[in-house]
Amino acid sequence: MKEKEPDPHGAPVRRFTDPAYRPLADDLAGLRREIDRIDEQVVKLLADRAMYVKDAARFKRDAFQVSAPARQAHVFERVRRLAEQHAPTFNGGFAGLPDVVESAYRALVAGSIACEQNYFGQTEAIAAPSPEKKDEQ
């Protein structure tokens, strides 16, 4: 039998063995529409996040500070905990969610650092405000 993509409008060809499982859509096309809708929201949030990453370059003195390994470790630990907290519990949940989220964030952070390094190269050092001026602000 030649391999081919599943029919998006066809009937399911498998079922979960958990009797409590409840389908989320009638067909694969419906599931894909929901995934696409969520992807739009995720990409919008990633675009917002990217602008904050870009702006962070203004606060870094050198390439090491851009890569910020301790911050990276904190982010990976934090998003893993968030995934554990937000993992769906209905339909048997999604046991691998923390691994998926951490893997996605490792790729996201690596790409973000590469971009931030580029933006850091487009900055120039400025004189730090004197302590008395800082107090006035």
Image (spheres, grey):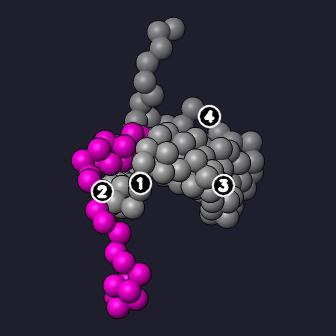
Q: Tag on residue 61?
A: 1
- In magenta, the rendered stretch is 111-137
Q: Tag on residue 125?
A: 2
Q: Earlier in the sequence, mark 2 or mark 4?
A: 4
Q: Are marks 1 and 2 in contact (CB under 8 Å)?
A: yes
Asked if residue 129 can be seen in this view, the reply is yes
Q: Nearer the viewer, mark 4 or mark 1?
A: 1
Q: Name the image quarter holding the C terminus.
A: bottom left
Give the distance between the C-alpha atoms of the residues marked 1 and 2, in whole angstroms.
8 Å
Q: Nearer the viewer, mark 3 or mark 1?
A: 1
* Residue type beneath disc 4: Arg
Give the distance between the C-alpha atoms of the residues marked 2 and 3, in whole angstroms.
32 Å
* Residue type beneath disc 1: Arg
Crowding around mark 1 (Cα neighbors within 10 Å: few <14, some 14 to 19, many 20+) is: few
Give the distance between the C-alpha atoms of the residues marked 3 and 4, in whole angstroms.
35 Å
**Magenta run includes residue 128:** yes
Secondary structure beneath dot 4 equals: loop
Q: Residue 2 vs residue 54: left or right?
A: right
x then y, percent, for residue 100: 60, 43
x then y, percent, for residue 44: 32, 58
* Residue type beneath disc 3: Glu
Number of numbered discs present? 4
Which residue is found at the position 62% from the left and 56% from the top?
Answer: 74
Q: Return the residue at label 3.
A: 77
